[in-house]
Image (spheres, coloured by chain):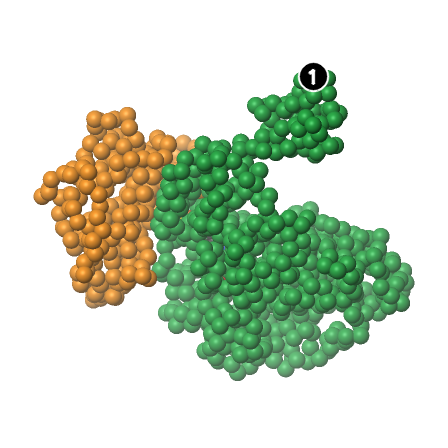
Chain colours: A orange, B green
Amino acid sequence: MKIVVQMTLNGLRIDVDEGMTILEAARFYGMNIPTLCYLEGLSPYGACRLCLVEIGMPGQSKLVTSCTYRVEEGLVVRTDSEWVIKRRKMLIELYLATCPSSKVIQDLASKYHVTTVRFTPWHEDCILCGLCVRMCAEQMQGKAIGFAHRGSNRRVTTPFDKESEVCRLCGGCMYVCPACQSRCQGPQEEQPVCNACLNLQQPCLDYFEDKMCFMDPCVACELDANREVKAKRRP
Amino acid sequence: MPINLIGVEPLYKELNHNTTLSLVRFLLQGGVLMNTGIRSKLAKPVDLKNLREMLKDRLDPKKQRLVVCGDTGCSVCGSRELAPAIEEVLQERGLAGSVELKVTGCLGFCEKGPLVLVFPGAVFYQQVQAEDAAEIVEKTVLRGEIVDRLLYTDPADGRKITCAYDIPFYKLQTRTLLETGWYINPLDIDDYIARGGYAALAKVLDGMPPEAVIAEIKEADLRGRGGAGFPTGLKWEFCRAAAGNEKYILCNADEGDPGAFMDRSLLEGNPHAVLEGIIIAAYAVGAKEGIIYIRIEYPTAVLKIEQAVRQARELGLLGKNILGSGFDFEVIISKGAGAFVCGEETALIRAAEGKVGEPRQKPPFPANAGFRGMPTVINNVETFVNVPLIINRGAAAYHETGTESSGGTKIFCLVGKINNSGLVEVPFGTTLRQIIFGIGGGIKNGKRFKAVQTGGPSGGCLPEEMLDLKVDFKDLAQAGSIMGSGGMIVMDEDTCVVDLARYFLQFLKSESCGKCFSCRVGIQRMLEIYDRLTTGSASIEDLDLLEELAVTVKDTSMCGLGQTSANPVLSTLRYFRDEYLAHVRDKRCPAGVCRSLFRYSIDQDSCIGCGSCAEQCHAGAIVEMEEGCYSINPELCTRCGACVEACVSDAITKG
Ligand SMILES: Cc1cc2nc3c(=O)[nH]c(=O)nc-3n(C[C@H](O)[C@H](O)[C@H](O)COP(=O)(O)O)c2cc1C
Ligand code: SF4
Ligand code: SF4
Ligand code: SF4
Ligand code: FES
């Protein structure tokens, strides 16, 4: 028998099955949370940190990654609070600077209205999200690739950097990679930030601690490029 | 003194490390009594009591005893040769039977090593070399006279101090955990038992229900000494209550903070106390198996804890039906290849399981799902050493020291630009000023105090204004630092805090496991900003960016490493903003450390034209412009400072 727990998601009381992650629960209820290292069918990994949400009551709240955090009775979750958005935007800026050629990342930047990059672009072709490693091991039963080294030297490779004997060249790893899809040719293709799709960004003028709108991407409002995110708390 | 090789042989087999080999030889040559042969197991608590009774003469306060520090610091300074020399003198004079020679773990005052203590009277001799052996035996042991030149001189009043307990460095401390180390040979379980060792275990097994043990630990307000300061009693309670019939105890001996050696000293000086704490914890939570996870870079500590486990097993203090109580417990030792991140509990569990040492998201906490997915208590070495103490003394008496929220004492490694570096133990609530200026004796060479970093590489730097801060988990966190495991690095006016923060980030950059994007990339991006700061190419916006980046890394990383990596950055930005501004606005490094931001030049008025600077310059940057007139080419100069040392008339200035 399924056990149901009650929790609060962006101010709504919801019932979810025990064992679900916050991300699964939020998606089930139509709230989108951005992810880079999560894919249905692969085990959650918690490396990209983009899916972070705020849990707990204000004052004692903290940020956790929703893809790895399991729901609990009475849990209070905000998927788009001011704190979350601020940190998420900084992460996106870091992603842009790491991998400006990825379409997935450029789209995220437009969606979150990240319009400047204050770091020197690195032009890496991997963000170490680990999707390929898990795809290979969990779906393709290959276990041909894995991580080597730690810290700034960490990378994805085959054992001892030797050509793999178990890789079947199925291409699963490339299929899931968010970094190696090349970006579309926007008007500013040379820039670290493209922003050609800025209208994907949530256009609401008002900012709420709890997310109010279920349309994602929003098509109802017009683009206002100069708008700043305004903090406005509900009474 | 009889040397019995049973129990020693296995030690030899595992040796591949040169220093370990010589150390063991040195311990042997020091006449250390190893095991006394095959021993019969202690079947009941009363057997332990009887054994202690038999060993009573070891406690005789009148017995003449020479204690030589055998820890790393003193060994490299010469105690390795000193102990055999004393042994030889004792043999020559026919004193080998009546005077006991003990080679112990760290005696604490590393600054003055090699150290020798002569009992009775705890006569303290510092910087003793092998040549001094005969004189010490001759005068102090045989005639009760003092060797004046080996005594410690109080720098405050020039007074010579005879007794160790009168030396301010020791007098101002509360040495409860470290004290025992002065009296026991860490390789000999009998020494530990004679001093009341395993009495706490016997007390617990002889009619104290596990719940009562946990209640006692809770009442003592024992908080984890590994860093986070989580209440230990609560942790045990969670683990005991967790579902699962297989439970584990893990001892975290991975100590990876640069400059910290508290856990190593405890393991080397008093390994049985660690073991006793572990066994009691196992009884309290209902674990059958324990793992001591220790870094292989600590060969002596590994050796000693292995010996301790072997001896305890021999006496039946480990294994089946311990002291006839029906409680079974075994310990294995797992050696890790020293990675800072493996000290994090979830990474440590994975490493102990033989997997890659990477942290994972909590919850579930180890108390519910730890080693092999089973409920696990993981505690720090020092935390375990506190356990027998609490059981023996009772929680109330134990809690008389410390603050309301943290009972007991804490060991710190006081290092850096401090007069008395070494291992110090103080009650929680002692101020930084008492530790640094009282016990530590202030800053080296009469320089000014600038900052102290507490808690290892990811701790914060606290300035002079914070010196009256009470050392406590809560107060340190409020001030923007952490307790960490107890590292304390003192810096003087010649330290550049910008350079310092950069140094720690560099450490963390290579020690992060690299899984979280925020931690891996965030630290590297912060370092890029530091590169600009230390070369004078940073802008004022860079400081805001640095701060924003630091809080992002702090808020969004998974484990404690990433979450605290911002501390050196944020605390220096908070307390030393002026110094950052000097680097940004004036392109100047006030402490004269950042090489791109100062120049050496020769003051022509003071220069006597000797040319010794030019001789020393490895870069060929100093040229004689005309007869007797030297000048430095800033393009070629690498700012090594060799010319400053070479100049006989102090003519070379920094600016
Ligand atoms: C990066 C990192 C390194 C750590 N290193 C150590 C260590 O070397 N020794 C230790 O006892 N605890 C270390 N810890 C703390 C452990 O995660 C854990 O909190 C501790 O072992 C729990 O024991 P305690 O409750 O007795 O303190 C570290 C934590 C982090 C985040
Ligand atoms: S192509 Fe090779 S490495 Fe990639 S998923 Fe397939 S088997 Fe694994
Ligand atoms: S190669 Fe692609 S999928 Fe694999 S870790 Fe890197 S970014 Fe992720
Ligand atoms: S915070 Fe850093 S060290 Fe910790 S899990 Fe993430 S990447 Fe690894
Ligand atoms: S999706 Fe959760 S951390 Fe990447």
Give the left or right position of residue B120, taking residue A174 as reference.
right
Quadrant position of the N terminus of chain B in the picture: bottom right
Q: Residue furthest toward the top? A: B626
- Extreme front residue here? B605
Residue B211 in view in this figure: yes
| Residue in view at x 89 percent, y 67 percent | B143
Q: Is residue B488 left or right of residue B11?
A: left
Q: Tell me: residue B158, above or below residue B328.
A: above
Residue marked by disc 1: B626
What residue do we see at 63% from left, 68% from top? Answer: B174
Residue B486, given in percent of the width and then of the height, sits at 55, 58
Location of residue A25 by image quarter: bottom left
Nearest the eye: B459 or B154: B154
Label 1 CA crowd tier, 10 Å (few <14, some 14–19, many 20+)? few
Q: Nearer the viewer, residue A112 or B444?
A: B444
Numbered disc total? 1
| Chain on which label 1 sits | B
Q: Nearer the viewer, residue B431 or A98?
A: B431
Please name the residue shown 16% across and 46% down the image.
Answer: A205
Residue at the spot 38% in from the left edge and 42% down from the top edge? B544
Say if disc 1 is inside 8 Å of ligand 4. Answer: no
- Residue B166, horizontal then vertical, whole percent: 73, 67
Front-most of residues A154 and B599? B599
Q: Residue B406: image x %, image y %?
A: 50, 69
SS for callout 1: strand
Q: Which image quarter holds the C terminus of chain B?
A: top right
**Name of the residue lying farthest toward the left:** A220
Q: Amino acid at mark 1?
A: Glu
Residue B516 in sight in this render? no
Above or below: residue A201 compared with residue B187? above
Compared to residue B654, the image places residue B44 above or below, namely: below
Whole-percent x, y for residue B45 in the image: 61, 80
